[in-house]
Image (cartoon, helix red, strand yellow):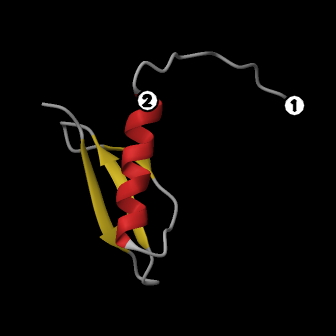
């Protein structure tokens, strides 16, 4: 089973999404959006961006 995007309204009345893995753990959280439609588009943007994305290691700066 693949992950699931949950779209919800937060306490401030903003719309957000979270991506949950098949085991129920939250693996990503989106920013606050003014509308539900914008939050749903945020889910779609993550899906598009993740398709074929590579994993790269970056050095810690400090």
Camera-nearest residue between 61 and 50:
50
Q: Give neighbour class at mark 1: few <14, some 14-19, many 20+ (Cα, 10 Å).
A: few
Q: Which quadrant does the N terminus fall into?
A: top left
- Quarter of the image for residue 9 reads bottom left
Q: Does residue 40 lie above or below 33 as drawn?
A: above
Q: Residue at x 53, y 17 (%)?
A: 55
Secondary structure under tag 1 reads loop
- Quarter of the image for residue 41 reads bottom left
Q: Does residue 24 lie above or below 53 as drawn?
A: below
Image location (x, y in percent) of residue 43: 37, 49
First in sequence, mark 2 or 1: give its number. Answer: 2
Q: Which mark is residue 41?
A: none
Secondary structure under tag 2 reads helix
Name the residue at the left extreme: 1
Q: Residue at x 23, y 38 (%)?
A: 3
Q: Give neighbour class at mark 2: few <14, some 14-19, many 20+ (Cα, 10 Å).
A: few
Q: Which residue is mark 1?
A: 62
- Quarter of the image for residue 46 reads top left
Q: Residue at x 33, y 46 (%)?
A: 19
Instruction: Give the CA separation, mark 2 to mark 1.
Output: 28 Å
Image location (x, y in percent) of residue 2: 19, 32
Image location (x, y in percent) of residue 27: 38, 41
| Left or right side of 7 for 48 | right
Image location (x, y in percent) of residue 34: 48, 75
Q: Does residue 16 lie above or below 43 as drawn?
A: below
Q: Which mark is residue 50?
A: 2
| Left or right side of 45 for 8 | left
């Amino acid at each position: 089973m693949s992950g699931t995007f949950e779209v919800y309204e937060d306490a401030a009345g903003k719309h957000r999404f979270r991506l949950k893995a098949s085991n129920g753990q939250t693996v990503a959280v989106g920013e606050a959006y003014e509308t539900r439609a914008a939050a749903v588009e945020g889910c779609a943007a993550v899906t598009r961006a993740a398709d074929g994305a590579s994993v790269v290691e970056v050095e810690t700066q400090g």
